[in-house]
Image (tube, rainbow, N blue to C red):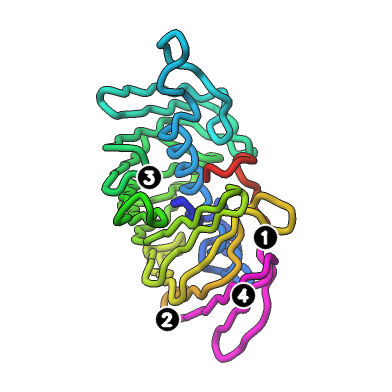
Amino acid sequence: MMMLAAFGVMFLASCNDESETPLAGNDDEVVNTEAELDADFEDIDNMTLESLESNVYSEEGSSGSRVAHRRHHIPDCAEVTHNYEEMTITIDFGEECELRNGKVVSGVIFITYTNRKFMPGSLTTTTLQDFYVDGKLIEGTRVVENISASLEDNPTFHITLTGGKITLEDGTFATRDADKTVMWIRADNPLRDEFHVLEGSTAYGFNFEGIDYSINVVETIVYKNFCDDQFIKAPVSGVKQVIKGDQEWIIDFGDGECDTLVTVTHDGETWTVELKRRKRLGNDANG
């Protein structure tokens, strides 16, 4: 979500061809690459959450020992080490490990935490070591702070990404920093959860062309966990501003209906774009 969905995410595209470069190419490609920009970091968020919420290990079994549980986001090929006393978690993917969405990863995710994620004031820090996704080196530190006033409120998280960088195999790279606030609207059925990326959330950096960009949420963006009979976490309303160099795009996600259509305004013209569906890591609602 954070994540968390909002969690929502999308880091940087995986191809160095100009048409595939984040915020480059034709207008429709600008919209779709931005719509997937945080995907790699959202996968990291989901695996972090799963490890924190004891979906990998319960606090203790009937015999007092740690008990393994079915993993949704973290693949079986990853080795998870949870030090409960020091409040640290290490997820080691080795030299090659395939996620459930088909991405191949390697390297290590390090997690430190101060409390469970729903506790107000809790702080979770995620860092990466030699972490590759489909051949891309991904770097950065992700910090998630629970800023909810109480357990009775909708869980609200302040999320920052610092030092974000993705380097392709040919050495070209793009950067990203982000600062956003996400509210998790929990339903009786987790499939009906919503994630609200609040107005004022932002991300910025330089794309693979070396051009500066920024992304600003100008009206709260609402993501639904379940749309069109699919568990996909789709944006259904809200407005985002995308700036690349001296050009601006306004992306309107609609009125709350579950569809893949967004309205784009750029250079005095407005049209509709269909977003690409993106496969989730798992089929549960932990993301």
* Dot placed on the residue nearer the N-terminal end, 3 or 2: 3
* Dot placed on the residue nearer the N-terminal end, 1 or 4: 4
248 magenta-colored: yes
Which residue is found at the position 48% from the left and 80% from the top? 248
Image marks 3 and 2: residues in contact by CB distance under 8 Å: no
Which residue is the site of mark 4? 254
Front: mark 2 or 4: 4
Magenta-colored span: 247-276
Amino acid of disc 1? Lys
Q: Secondary structure at mark 3?
A: loop
149 magenta-colored: no
Alpha carbon distance from label 1 to label 4: 16 Å
Alpha carbon distance from label 2 to label 1: 26 Å
Front: mark 1 or 3: 3
Q: Residues within 10 Å of mark 2 (few under 14, many from 20)?
A: few
Which residue is the site of mark 2? 246
Amino acid of disc 2? Asp
Alpha carbon distance from label 3 to label 2: 40 Å
* Dot placed on the residue nearer the N-terminal end, 1 or 3: 3
Which residue is the site of mark 1? 276
